[in-house]
Image (cartoon, rainbow, N blue to C red):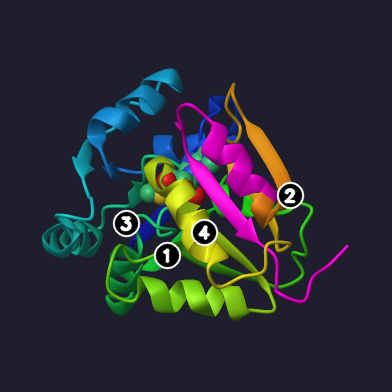
Amino acid sequence: MSTLYLVATPIGNLSDFSPRGVEILNQVDQIACEDTRTSSVLLQHFQIQKPTFSFHQHNEHRKVNHLVNLLNGGTDVALISDAGMPGISDPGFLAARAAHQNGHTVTAIPGPDAATTAVAASGLPCDRYLFEGFLPPKKGRETRIREIADSDITTVLYVSPHKLVRFLNRFSEFAEPDRWICIARELTKKFEEVQRGQLSELIRIWEERESIKGEFVVIISGKSYSE
Ligand code: SAM
């Protein structure tokens, strides 16, 4: 029986990598990387020298067999994504399922993820929250937006920068203008912003920005929440 480790890596600040994450990457036989070039920066920084292979959303169905063969052959493997926790809007689920199904140990090494970091900083209720990740680009998108508008618990979304204003405007068609929102940008990085306000105000602020760059988490309060 071998072990598949899902190792969380920093979402922007290399100091957030845990000593145990480094230890596990130094200990395994091979490292599956979402992007071997992106991960080489992290691996070099921590002086980790291990064989790597790519494991991303376009090859994971094929590569999962390779990964299981390695585990079956007695090789311990770590899986890392470009940032954050593998499996969270990143490759990881198929690998973890296949490892379990083949009788191997699956261990997640905790660390940063953008959703939890943002929800903690948001000052919005986080006793219960729904992680929606990225909304589907087309089919089903409007249904999800309506559901979020109607939801009574906090929702956490990953939103790409070029869709941020469009998303907020679309959401405002189904939600009240005083809905509480938090926009967390570039978490743990030099230009981190955690901005909290009501929907109409945040739309105004972000529409006025000349350019919208970086990585974003959007937190939306439940519809009954007020302060
Ligand atoms: N596995 C990652 C995690 O654990 O959070 C998520 C990967 S997903 C492909 C990338 C998205 O996560 C970005 O588009 C953004 O929505 C969010 N994200 C990642 N890093 C971030 C950061 N430093 N600040 C804000 N959002 C971030």
Q: Quadrant of residue 192?
A: top right
Q: Which mark is residue 91?
A: 3
Indicate left or right for 12 with 62 as reference: right
Q: Amino acid at mark 1?
A: Val
Q: Which mark is residue 157?
A: 4
Highlighted range, magenta: 201-227
Q: Which mark is residue 197?
A: 2
Q: Amino acid at mark 2?
A: Gly
Q: Which residue is mark 1?
A: 106
Q: Nearer the viewer, mark 2 or mark 3?
A: 2
Up/down of 183 relative to 221, above or below: above
Q: Secondary structure at mark 2?
A: strand
Q: Nearer the viewer, mark 4 or mark 1?
A: 4
Q: CA distance from mark 4 to mark 3?
A: 17 Å
Q: Amino acid at mark 3?
A: Pro
Up/down of 220 relative to 83, above or below: below
